[in-house]
Amino acid sequence: MTRYTVSPDAAAAAVDDGTVVLNMRTKRYYSLNETGATVWRMLENDADTAAITDQLVALYEVDEATAAQTLDALLGELAAEALIAPAPK
């Protein structure tokens, strides 16, 4: 179980079909679809990767392996843009 923290430089707003995240340091916007918005909300609520994967399986009727793979890819992209970071242990 890994936890991530949302960067203090990230500001998010819900939109009709997902969430928009602004990196206030770089002034770049990122658009998250409905699935990404679900992940973002759970990250803001301190959910670990296992809980997020379980939620994705429940909401989107995908198998656990697919949900975990998709989550890992999204977390990697968010971390690369400095929007999230692994939480200290």
Image (cartoon, rainbow, N blue to C red):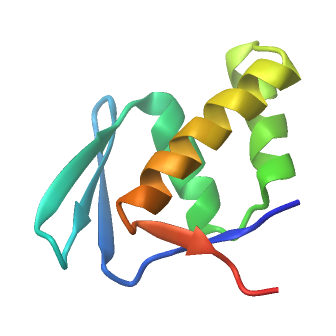
Task: Count the numbered circles shown.
Answer: 0
Q: Position of residue 19 (x, y in %)?
A: 34, 45
State which quadrant residue 83 falls in: bottom left
State which quadrant residue 27 falls in: bottom left
Asked if 5 appears above or below 38 in the picture, the reply is: below
Q: Position of residue 60 (x, y in %)?
A: 68, 18
Rendered residue at 15%/71% (across/down): 26
Asked if residue 77 lies left or right of residue 15, the reply is: right
Q: Position of residue 53 (x, y in %)?
A: 78, 38
Rendered residue at 35%/60% (across/down): 81
Asked if residue 51 lies left or right of residue 66, the reply is: right
Quarter placement of the N terminus: bottom right
Asked if residue 38 lies left or right of residue 33, the reply is: right
Asked if 10 appears above or below 15 in the picture, the reply is: below
Quarter placement of the C terminus: bottom right
Which residue is the extreme one toward the front? 80
State which quadrant residue 65 falls in: top right
Rendered residue at 79%/60% (across/down): 48
Asked if 47 appears above or below 20 in the picture, the reply is: below
Which residue is the extreme one toward the left? 27
Q: Position of residue 30 (x, y in %)?
A: 25, 48
